[in-house]
Image (spheres, rainbow, N blue to C red):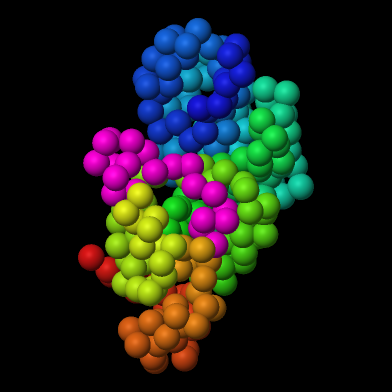
Amino acid sequence: MLHDGENALVVDPGVAQPVLEALALEGLNLQGILITHHHGDHTGGVAELRQATGAQVFGPAKEHVPEPLMKLSQGNSAHLLGLDFQVIDVPGHTAGHIAFYCKATDGIPLLFCGDTLFSGGCGRLFEGTPAQMLNSLNALAALPANTRVCCTHEYTLSNLKFAREVDPNNAALENYQEHCLALRSQDLPTLPSTMALELAINPFLRSTSPTVLASVKRFDAEGFSKYGSFATLRSWKNQYQ
């Protein structure tokens, strides 16, 4: 949730009740609902919230999301809370996945990236191709380094376990893992992250770095040769435990 003390927006509400409780607690009016993709854990609360609050829904033009909604794609924007959220097409996790980017909230850029980019990881490729996901991640990586990265799942610790396997000598990654372990031990979230941090520690944004390349080759030299570093890295993560 993002709010200005009077009005609020929520992103990918899989369930309505926690949102309604937060609105009541803070005395807020729900102005808008931003949807990044069609999966039920991101859209399950939309209908109830719309009915309860009258909030306008903004979502991907190329996916089936509960209507009515403002259908958006690359180049469009959503204006809420006096802010402009630019839409970026980021196919990969799903075919029509979008992200919302605001150049300045309190002077700092803000990204709602759904299940495309996680801290230390990226989403599974349910509908898109590795090439699409890589292009999507590169588009996000080009945003300002101080961009706050708001992912939609707290997968950080499991992602970092895999990242350490792939990039074991990365001191920034080791320090970040220790930091996140301390946060989670206090039941605190690891998010939001920042783009600068993800560029330093996330193997899916570093798939062409020498260390990651070497690890991917050791894991599956044949796959690396046939499909490339990123696709092989994603395949490795799919089976990693």
Residue at image coords 68%, 52% = 144
Determine the image quadrant of residue 136: bottom right
Most foreground residue, 193 or 123: 193
Q: Quadrant of residue 125?
A: bottom left
- With respect to residue 142, does 15 lie above or below? above
- Residue 205: give x, y in percent of width and height: 53, 66
> Residue 19 in the image: x percent, y percent?
43, 21
The answer to which quarter of the image holds residue 16 is top left
Residue 170: x %, y % from top left: 41, 70
Residue placed at 35% from the left, 87% from the top? Answer: 218
Q: Give the residue drawn at x 71%, y 29%.
A: 83
Judge whether 10 appears above or below 104 on screen: above
Residue 188 covered by magenta stretch: yes
Judge by depth and name the residue closer to the eye, 94 or 26. 26
Task: Quarter of the image for the C terminus: give it.
Answer: bottom left
The magenta stretch is 180-199
**Residue 186 part of the magenta-drawn span:** yes
- In the visual, does 108 lie left or right of 169? right
Q: Residue at x 55, y 37 (%)?
A: 35
